[in-house]
Image (spheres, helix red, strand yellow):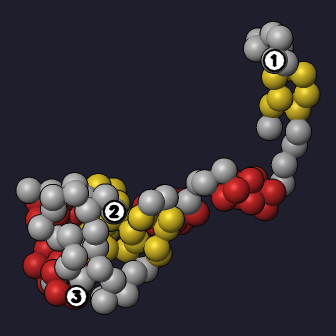
Amino acid sequence: MLIYDVEDPDACSSVLKLSHDDTRTLSELLGASQVVEEVEAATHEIEGLTIDWIELRPETAADGVTIADGAYRKRTGASIVAVTRSGDPVPAPEPDFVLRGGDTVVAAGTIEGVAALRAILRP
């Protein structure tokens, strides 16, 4: 972490070295989601996996519908692997999780499957 002088924003006044665990803790305190990091790691490990963040508009037809009732995986082949609501992550939401307008859905699947899910959630 670099700390810059208030009087001279080009001058670095000190450097603080953080461990991996300290960096993760600081990120969480600042509001970063560990879900993003885990999903990015999965992207590098699984060939052909597409991951997308789909922001649900307030007027979405998915508002008030559970993941199970929407049958999104059955209809598209893409899975909803996480949801963020008001900045709070919900990793691996259960089938009875109710989607709301304003949520951001993290979807994983083939390019075609994720595109089909996006078309349903954001027509």
Work out how far the residue at label 2 is from the one at label 3, CA to CA, in angstroms: 17 Å
Tell me what residue is drawn at x 49 percent, y 58 percent: 87
Badge 1: few (under 14), some or many (20 or more) residues near its Cα, within 10 Å? few
State whether residue 20 appears in this view.
no
Q: Nearer the viewer, mark 2 or mark 3?
A: 2
Q: Secondary structure at mark 1?
A: loop
Residue type, numbered disc 2: Asp
Q: Position of residue 118 (x, y in %)?
A: 17, 60
Q: Above or below — where is 113 with respect to 123?
A: below
State whether residue 107 appears in this view.
yes
Kindly identify which residue carries mark 3.
Answer: 68
Query: Viewed as shown, does residue 67 lie left or right of 45?
Result: left
Tell me what residue is drawn at x 10 percent, y 79 percent: 75
Quarter of the image holding residue 57? bottom left
Which badge, 3 or 1, comes first in the chain's sequence? 1
Which badge, 2 or 3, comes first in the chain's sequence? 3
